[in-house]
Image (cartoon, grey):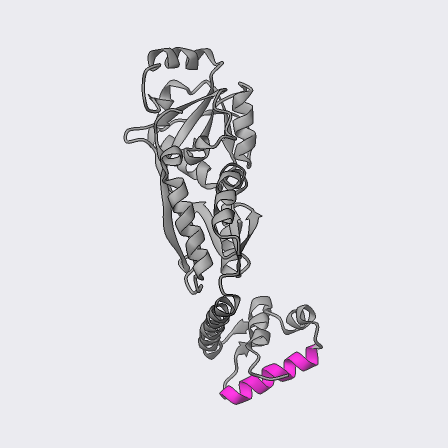
Amino acid sequence: MSSKNYAYFLKIVECKSVSRAAEILYISQPSLTKYLQRLEVELGEKLFDRKQYPIKLTYVGQCFYEYVKKVEEEKLKLEAKIDEFRNMGRDKIIIGMPLWRSNILFPEFFPIFSQSYPLIQVYLKEVSSSVIENQIISNEIDIGIVNLPINYANLLYEPIAQEHILLACSKKNPFIQDMLSKTRDHPFYPNIDIRALPDQPFILTQPGQYLTEYVNAMLSSLKLELNCVFRTANVSTAINLVAANVGFTFVPEIGTKSKYFPLNDIALFTLGNPPLETSLVAIYKKSKYLSNAMRLFISELRSFCNSNKWHSSERL
């Protein structure tokens, strides 16, 4: 076992245990221990404090760890560049999107992208924004399509579009019917004062979701608490409940432009002055080599989301 195989060292750091790392790597613990001893002899310093459990990097170990991470990242970049050259336009990219966003956006965007770039294979992972960030860090996802803010300093982002956070209401609701009669000729989404609705039932997303955080910040500034009758992690569920006149909810604007959004049953309003809005972005690891295929995906998605249909605030 070569001491230059840094993957073994990285796995020990990750597991904080030689025995656990050996188990995951499918090698014997004595073999991995000998590997670590050879590495420490070559460097002339101990890399781990074995008196602690779980074992902990020494100062030299931490310095070596930072060096190895950079080496491995540059190696991945080089391999990606070589693969891109060899494949002559053929490429595979893994995209992460939250479930509702992918349900609404992907069915309309992907056929256009696929027709324009048939040699690029796109694999979609539908998971929460926090999972997307973690899997980008661990190189399981290439690009994530999420809303700001992001939580990791070693992630970069490129803007896709600005979008309002809209209040979604059933057109069958008597209060909303009265509001709509007063704004019937309004060319844009009318604005509504959320303080007029504290007793109305609300379907809200779960704590920790970006949409929840935006809404909570607005409510906190108004010192307002809503009548939450149900919580769900899936915005599609919330929208369907609104369409069934169960309550009100909040929704990012771009998704409401999709032909899959039940606009015939739902009225939409902006909130606040200026209206509450958020940034939709493409995130990726800072050390990631962005292939031509990844750049094309970001560029085409930006153009798509900023087209007249998807970005106009006019009523449909």
Name of the residue lying farthest toward the left? 274
The answer to whether 63 is drawn above or below residue 43 in the figure is above
Q: Name the quadrant of the N terminus.
A: bottom right
Is residue 150 shown to the viewer in this render?
no
Residue 60 rendering spot, x and y as whole percentages: 46, 79
Residue at position x 39%, y 10% in the image? 178
Res 92 quadrant in image? bottom right
Nearest the eye: 110 or 104: 110
Point out the image quarter for the C terminus: top left
What percent of the width, then of the height, locates residue 186?
32, 18
Where is residue 305? Give x, y as percent: 40, 40
Q: Is residue 49 above or below residue 80?
A: below
Q: At x 35% / y 14%, what residue is drawn?
A: 184
The image shows residue 188 at horizontal and vertical percentages of 33, 24
Residue at the spot 41% in from the left edge and 19% down from the top edge? 197
Q: Depth check: give the residue in front, 253 or 165.
A: 253
What predominant SS class does the magenta segment belong to? helix
Query: As rendered, which of 232 and 73 lies closer to the eye?
Result: 73
Residue 102 seen in render: yes
**Count of numbered labels shown in the rendering:** 0
In the image, what residue occupies the spot 45% across and 56% down? 294
| Residue 35 included in the magenta stretch of the image | yes
Residue 248: in magenta span: no
Magenta residues (range): 29-43
Nearer-the-camera pick, 248 or 305: 305
Above or below for 305 versus 193:
below
